[in-house]
Image: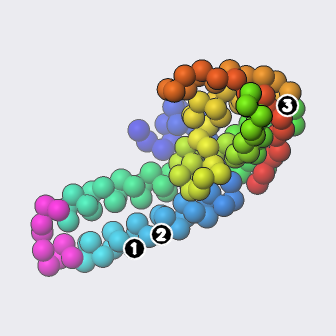
Amino acid sequence: MAADSPATSTRTPPILTSEGRAWLQARHDRITSRLARIEDELGNERSQQLISEQQQLVEQVEALTHVLRDAVAPRELSDDPSIVEVGDEVEVAFSDGSTETFLIVHPVEAGMDERRTSMDAPLAAAVLGRRPGDRVTVTSPAGAYSCTLLRRSRLD
């Protein structure tokens, strides 16, 4: 699909925290560097393994380039301070009295550290659009459970 096609222009841009953008940029740079080394090696040797790796890296660079180009920071969005949105840090309480604090992020940023949770994860999906004080039911592969949204705050 072309970058300027109507389907692309109407999609919501990925939301990346500033830390996430830096992490993805560093990943992009590492992959680009490895790709350059492979292209040099291909001048000397045309192994199927190098060709396959080159193709995979080209796809990864293209995907990361699109995400980095199109991404917006949470602070660039109109924020409704009363509801949970992507880019928010949230705290939830479980029925056993434990609490968990996590940052809801775009899936591409979720692997960055233990604190980040993909917006597609069951817990994050359950609290998106909800307000502090709301009790939500989370449907996960391990079964359904409930929690209460204690707070949300917008990060950059």
Q: What is the spatial separation of the Cα atoms under label 2 and label 3, in whole angstroms?
A: 39 Å
Task: Say which label, 2 or 3, has the lower sequence index.
Answer: 2
Where is mark 2, residue-wise?
29
Q: Secondary structure at mark 3?
A: loop
Residue 34 is left or right of residue 137, and the answer is left
Residue 83 is left or right of residue 49, and the answer is right
Q: What is the spatial separation of the Cα atoms under label 1 and label 3, in whole angstroms?
A: 45 Å
Residue 145 is left or right of residue 28, and the answer is right
Where is mark 1, residue-wise?
33
Q: Relative to 35, is 156 above or below?
A: above
Q: Secondary structure at mark 2?
A: helix
Segment colored magenta: 41-49
> Percent position (x, y) of residue 48?
13, 61
> Percent position (x, y) of residue 109?
57, 51
**Amino acid type of disc 1?**
Ser
Where is mark 3, residue-wise?
132
> Percent position (x, y) of residue 23?
57, 63
Q: In the picture, residue 120 is in which quadrant?
A: top right
| Quarter occupied by the N terminus | top left
Circles 2, 3 touching at the beta carbon (< 8 Å): no
Is 90 in front, or is 67? 90
Q: Relative to 101, is 149 above or below?
A: above
